[in-house]
Image (cartoon, helix red, strand yellow):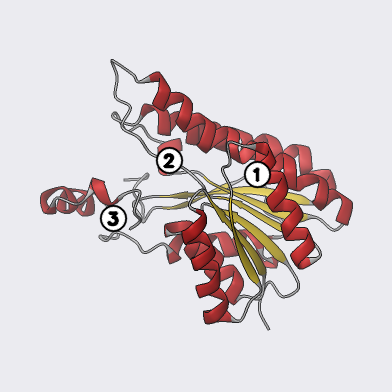
Amino acid sequence: MGMLDGRSALVTGAARGNGAAIARLLAAEGAGVALVDIDGHEVVAEAARITDATGARTFGARVDVCHAADIEAAVAQAVDAFGRIDILVNNAGVLFDTPLPGLDMRLWEKTLAVNLTGPLRCIDAVVPELIKQGDGGAIVNITSIAASIGFDDYVAYCASKAGLMGVTRAAALALAPHRIRVNAVAPGIIDTDMTKGLYADPAAAAAIIERIPLGYIADPVEVAKAVLYLVSDLSTYVTGTELLVDAGYVVR
C-alpha cells in the first residue's frame, strides 16, 4: 500500500524538474495526479511516462497559472477524473535576472504574476473543493532559500518567494478550521533546468558546491521527498511552516 492511496493531487509546473519529480513520487505512493504546466506538450508526455512507470492514474494539461480560467478548468478536470482532490502543490515558477539599479519592471511583474499571484489563484480554486469534501487536505507551496536570504541579481525572485511564504502562513491560519494544512518547501540549489545556468561554468559550479555544507547539488527527488512528508499522514500536526531542503546552505 502507498502512503497516498485513495487521494489525488494537482501539481503545477510539473512538466520537468522539481514538479515532475514531485508528481512522480506522489503517484508512486498511490495518488492520482493532475500534472499542469504552461508547456502543454511536455506535461502530457510526462504524465504518460509517470503512468507507465507507476501504474497511477494521471493526466497532463496546459495551464498558465496567470489565467484563472485555466486553473479552474484544471481543478474541474481533476475532480472529474479522480472524484476528489486532496493535495495542491504550487510549484510553477520563473527566474529572471533582475538586478538593481535599472530593474526591468516587466520582469518584476511577470515574476510576481507567476510566483506569487499564480499560487494564490490555485489555492483560491482548490480550497472550495477541499471544504466541500469536508475531510481536510494539504497544500504545499514551493518557495526557495531566496525567501530567507538575498541574491543580489534576483530581486524579483527573492521578493516573490518571500511573499509566498507570507501567503503560506496566512493561509495556514485561515484554513486550519477546515483541517486544511498549508506548508512550504524551500529548495536550495537543485539540479533543474531553471538553475543550470547558475553552475554551467565549472568554476561557478565549484564555488556553489563549496558553499553547500553537504557538498553537492541535489536531484529534484530531494524536494519531492519533503513534499511527500508534508502531504502525507506523517505530518498531520504540521501547518504554517517552511521546510528547508538546502543541505545547510542557509545556516552556514
Q: Which numbered disc, 1 or 2, marks the residue closer to the eye?
A: 1
Q: CA distance from mark 3 to mark 2?
A: 26 Å
- Residue 209 seen from this side: yes
Give the side of residue 149 with respect to residue 47, left or right.
Answer: left
User: Where residue 72 sits: x, y (%)?
Assistant: 72, 45
The label on residue 80 is none
Give the side of residue 7 with respect to residue 10, left or right.
Answer: right
Mark 1 or mark 2: name the one nearer the start of the chain.
1
Disc 2 is placed on an element classified as: loop
Q: Which residue occupies 28% across, 55% down?
A: 213
User: Where residue 178 sits: x, y (%)?
Assistant: 84, 48
Task: Residue type at mark 1: give it.
Answer: Asp
Q: Residue furthest front?
A: 41
How many badges with numbers are in the image?
A: 3
Mark 3 or mark 1: name the one nearer the start of the chain.
1
The label on residue 94 is 2
Task: Residue type at mark 3: give it.
Answer: Pro
User: Where residue 83 sits: x, y (%)?
Assistant: 81, 65
10 Å neighbourhood of mark 3: few (<14), some, or many (≥20)?
some
Task: Residue type at mark 2: give it.
Answer: Val
183 w.r.t. 222: above or below:
above
Q: CA distance from mark 3 to mark 1?
A: 41 Å
Q: Which residue is mark 1?
A: 70
Q: Which residue is mark 3?
A: 213
